[in-house]
Image (cartoon, rainbow, N blue to C red):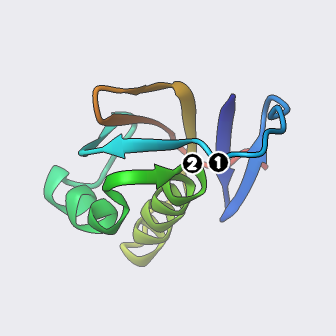
Amino acid sequence: MILTCAFGFVLSTFAATSSDSVQTFVVTNYQIVGDSQLSPETVATVVAAHTGTNVTLSEIVKAASELQREYVNRGYPVPSLAIAEDRITNGVVTINVFRGGLF
């Protein structure tokens, strides 16, 4: 599944399969790939509340939404962010950043 976050809305690119249990991840770090204008220190501060054990995908999406808000707070154009579930490996969540929005 790939989740795209644009203007504070989460758009699921692929339909999620339903299951009785919520998948969780161990998240130690977020890696930003692409057109990021935020410093690594700023990113670490913004996503710090979304690390740890048993982090749900919705919590990871919240981290992406908070990153978008940080762009706006600093006067940057709102980026599109994409998170591929299969790119959450070894505790690292990879977030792809694209300049501008989808609209």
Question: Residue placed farthest to the front in the image?
Answer: 20
Is the C-beta separation of discs 2 and 1 under 8 Å?
A: yes
Residue wearing tag 1: 22
Q: Nearer the viewer, residue 86 or 12?
A: 86
Residue at 60% of width from left, 56% of height from top?
Answer: 58
Crowding at dot 2, Cα within 10 Å, few <14 / some 14-19 / many 20+, comes out as: some
Q: Residue at x 33, y 51 (%)?
A: 53
Q: Position of residue 99 (x, y in %)?
A: 52, 42
**What's the residue at 77%, 47% (across, down)?**
11
Residue 94: name its quadrant: top left
The residue under the point 34% across, 42% down is 26
Q: Viewed as shown, does residue 98 lie left or right of 51? A: right
Badge 1 marks a residue whose secondary structure is loop
Q: In the rendered structure, find residue 57 and report the number of the disc placed on it.
A: 2
Residue 67: image x %, image y %? 43, 61
Q: Is residue 91 left or right of residue 22?
A: left
